[in-house]
Amino acid sequence: MEESLRQKLNDDLRQSMRDRDEVRTSTLRMLLSAVKYAEFKPDKHITLNDADILGVIAKEIKQREDSIEAYKAGGRQDLVDRETAEKTILEQYMPPQMSREDIAAEAKKVIEEKGASGMSDKGKVMPALIAKFKGKADGKMINEVVTELLSSM
């Protein structure tokens, strides 16, 4: 049986603590905390599956990218380096990202399935693609591809 992503994160955290790798340890602790936070809803506790955890990791990577831009603008190279190191660690847990061509091919199928005929049908297409590519493609790129395809109809 394949080990779950959550188990891998916990194992890697224990190993980084043994190795005294402070950046990796703090990054993995932050990530596991974000996963736990995502599991608590006001009325119930849910358990995230691997795809949902990949969504949390993608969100954390996006936050690092935004922080890197802000720190570069502020001239804080020390913080840029720290955020870049954290982003690199987080990216190791992501599956290979889908290419624009792969997204376009899948988007065409979904557009056909949903019977979309223009920009007004974007709301039918996007949720299916976002769910399908969770953690495997950037939402911004999916949006661009769908907009391109639907506007050319």
Image (tube, rainbow, N blue to C red):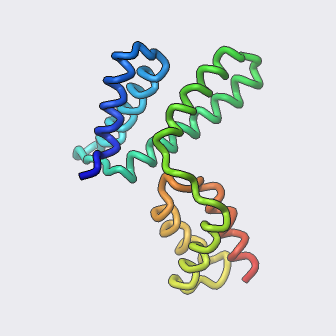
Residue located at (29% from left, 40% from top): 40
Which x, y percent locates residue 56? 44, 43
Q: How many marks?
A: 0
141 sits left or right of 109 in the view = right
34 sits left or right of 95 in the view = left
Which x, y percent locates residue 91? 53, 39
| Image quarter (top left, top right, bottom left or bottom right) of the C terminus | bottom right
Query: Residue 22 falls in which quadrant of the image?
Result: top left
Residue located at (76% from left, 79% from top): 152
123 sits left or right of 76 in the view = left
Which x, y percent locates residue 53? 39, 45
140 sits left or right of 16 in the view = right
Which x, y percent locates residue 127? 50, 66
Residue located at (23% from left, 52% from top): 1
Q: Is residue 23 above or below residue 46?
A: above
Query: Residue 81 falls in which quadrant of the image?
Result: top right
